[in-house]
Each structure stands twice: as C-alpha cells, then as structure tokens.
C-alpha cells in the first residue's frame, strides 16, 4: 500500500451480490455510448437514423445497434417495429430508462455546478504533485 493510500474500500459496505450488481450496471453506463443514447431518447421517440445523427461523435451503425440492443436487454429501451415497407423501427425509453435519464440529468447538473471547483482542485493537486502521472 502506498504511503498516501487510506485503505478505504467498499469491503463491508455491500454484500457480494450487491457489489456485483452495482459493477454490472456501472459497466453498462460507463461505456462510450449508453448514457448518450439514454439522454437523446429522453427527448422522445427516435427512429434509428434520427438517433444515429443526433449522437455527437459519429457512432457507427454497428455500435448503435449493439448499444440499443444492450439497453433493450437491460430493460431501459423499448424497440417497436412497424410493419411497413421498408420496416420502421422506433426506440424509446422504458420507465426504467426514464428514471435513469432523471439521474443522469441530476449528475449533469451537479457536474456543471462543481466543474470550476474540481478544475481548481486538479490544478492545485497537480502543482503539489508534479510528475505523478495522475490524470
């Protein structure tokens, strides 16, 4: 253990089932696209191409398909196929997805309120710990 390490862990805070559940959910939300898809769908129902065009950074068709399927599997997104030629597919948040979008908005608001403070702390920490390699 390094001299500055406090030894604080999550051991004892969660039983192993809870810890695995939290890690599982955070892994999904920590990927590059899931949160962005949830945020965009919180604005309303989107067709596949609308969703693809709305996401910043240019998500590929394959990655968007994987992302919405994973979110559908997790119960966050519903997919409706309309029997037209060509088929029309709509995506929207489920109740669970909407509750997640609410939490994301809360986290976004918090990060905007504290961004300058966090930036200042980083600058001071980096100055006090040159060459640490921590970013």
Image (tube, helix red, strand yellow):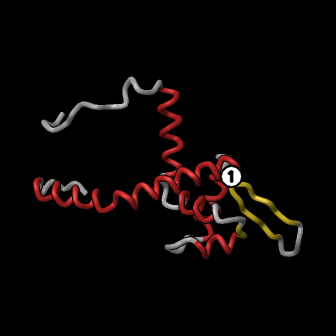
Q: Residue 36: percent from the left, percent from the top?
A: 54, 62
* Quarter assignment of residue 45: bottom right
Is residue 64 left or right of 12 when viewed as pictured? right
Q: Residue 66: percent from the left, percent from the top?
A: 62, 59
Q: Residue 26: percent from the left, percent from the top?
A: 49, 45
Q: Nearer the viewer, residue 118 or 18?
A: 118
Q: Nearer the viewer, residue 56 or 112?
A: 112
* Quarter assignment of residue 115: bottom left
Q: Residue 91: percent from the left, percent from the top?
A: 72, 62
Q: Nearer the viewer, residue 67 or 92?
A: 92
**Crowd band around label 1 with a 10 angstrom C-alpha radius: few (<14), some (14–19), many (20+):** some
Residue at 65 percent across and 63 percent down: it is 41
* Quarter assignment of residue 118: bottom left
Q: Number of numbered discs present?
A: 1
Above/below status of 76 relative to 123: above
Q: Residue furthest front?
A: 113
Residue at 28 percent across and 31 percent down: it is 8
Is residue 30 left or right of 64 when viewed as pictured? left
Q: Which residue is mark 1?
A: 72
> Which part of the image, by quadrant, shows the N terminus?
top left
């Amino acid at each position: 253990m390094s001299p500055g390490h406090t030894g604080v862990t999550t051991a004892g805070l969660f039983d192993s089932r809870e810890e695995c559940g939290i890690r599982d959910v955070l892994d999904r939300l920590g990927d590059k696209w899931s949160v962005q898809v949830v945020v965009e769908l919180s604005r309303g129902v989107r067709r596949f191409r609308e969703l693809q065009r709305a996401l910043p950074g240019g998500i590929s068709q394959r990655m968007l398909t994987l992302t919405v399927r994973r979110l559908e599997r997790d119960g966050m997104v519903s997919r409706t196929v309309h029997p037209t030629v060509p088929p029309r597919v709509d995506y929207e948040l489920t109740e669970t997805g909407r509750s997640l979008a609410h939490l994301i908005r809360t986290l976004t608001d918090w990060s905007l309120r504290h961004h300058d403070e966090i930036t200042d702390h980083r600058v001071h920490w980096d100055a006090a710990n040159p060459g640490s390699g921590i970013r």
